Amino acid sequence: MWAAHVTDPYVDPTTGVLRNIHDITDAAVLAEAERDLAFLRDDELKRFPLPGAWDADHLRAFHRHLFGDVYAWAGEPRRVDLTRGGSPFAHWRHVEPALDDLFAKLRAERILGGLARPEFLGRFTYFFAEVNVVHPFREGNGRTQRAFFRQLALFAGWRVDFGLVDRERYLAGCVAAMVGELDTLADQFAVALVGRA
């Protein structure tokens, strides 16, 4: 699905598996452990909001919360370039400045508060897609974004249930959004946007 370029410092060169705090060397076992541990941490986030200023530090705190039980580098911006399906995400040196610019814009828009449903849906989709293009972490970007944006929606007065989206359409929407086509992603988020908080 994704590829890292040149030497990937996050991967053990002997096993080809992401370095992790449990020293798991089997990719399938690591994927299962990561999924299970992140699921439990995400469940916590559904019950207890993670305080922050809706900035890059806040997003990193979400990643750290979700993946800190698996990766020592959880919450740190990636230091390697990534692509998906031949399309590059932001160069790793641009991750932090891009997030700073994006979150400044989000705060200038009052964290999307006070918007009617159509306007909220449009801006929510835009910001989600932009963070996805930056892809700030080596692993766990999608789950981090969904947790972060679920809480952002609540802060703005809306309830979002990402469990309602069609996974294949959502992933296709994320790919299309990399070239600025937001309609497919917005259609999926329209399903996920279940009402006022």
Image (spheres, rainbow, N blue to C red):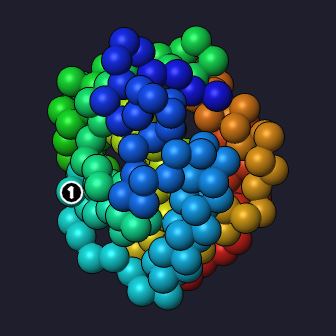
In the image, residue 26 sits, relative to residue 10, either above or below, namely below
- Which part of the image, by quadrant, shows the C terminus? bottom right
In the image, residue 101 sits, relative to residue 147, either above or below, namely above
Find residue 174 and report its horizontal and vertical position in percent.
Answer: 62, 34
In the image, residue 177 sits, relative to residue 195, either above or below, namely above
Find residue 32 and report its horizontal and vertical position in percent.
Answer: 64, 58
Please give left or right for residue 84 compared with residue 104 in the image: right
In the image shown, does 71 or 13 lie closer to the viewer? 13
Residue on which the image places disc 1: 57
For the residue labelled by badge 1, is the local secondary structure a helix, a strand or a loop?
A: helix
Question: Residue at the location (21% across, 57% down)?
Answer: 57
Q: Is residue 26 visible?
A: yes
- Which part of the image, by quadrant, shows the N terminus? top right
Question: Residue at the location (45% across, 70% down)?
Answer: 151
In the image shown, does 59 or 161 lie closer to the viewer? 59
In the image, residue 111 sits, relative to residue 88, either above or below, namely below
Q: Is residue 132 visible?
A: no
Find residue 194 and report its horizontal and vertical position in percent.
Answer: 70, 71
Please give left or right for residue 152 compared with residue 7 in the image: right
Q: Residues within 10 Å of mark 1 (few under 14, many from 20)?
A: some
Question: Residue at the location (31% across, 30% down)?
Answer: 9
Picture quadrant of residue 111: bottom left
Question: Residue at the location (27% across, 76% down)?
Answer: 51
Residue at the extreme bottom of the image, as rendered: 47
Amino acid type at mark 1: Asp
Residue at the extreme front of the image, as rendered: 14
Find residue 110 and report its horizontal and vertical position in percent.
Answer: 29, 60
In the image shown, does 176 or 186 lie closer to the viewer? 176
Please give left or right for residue 185 compared with residue 105 in the image: right
In the image shown, does 178 or 140 lie closer to the viewer? 140
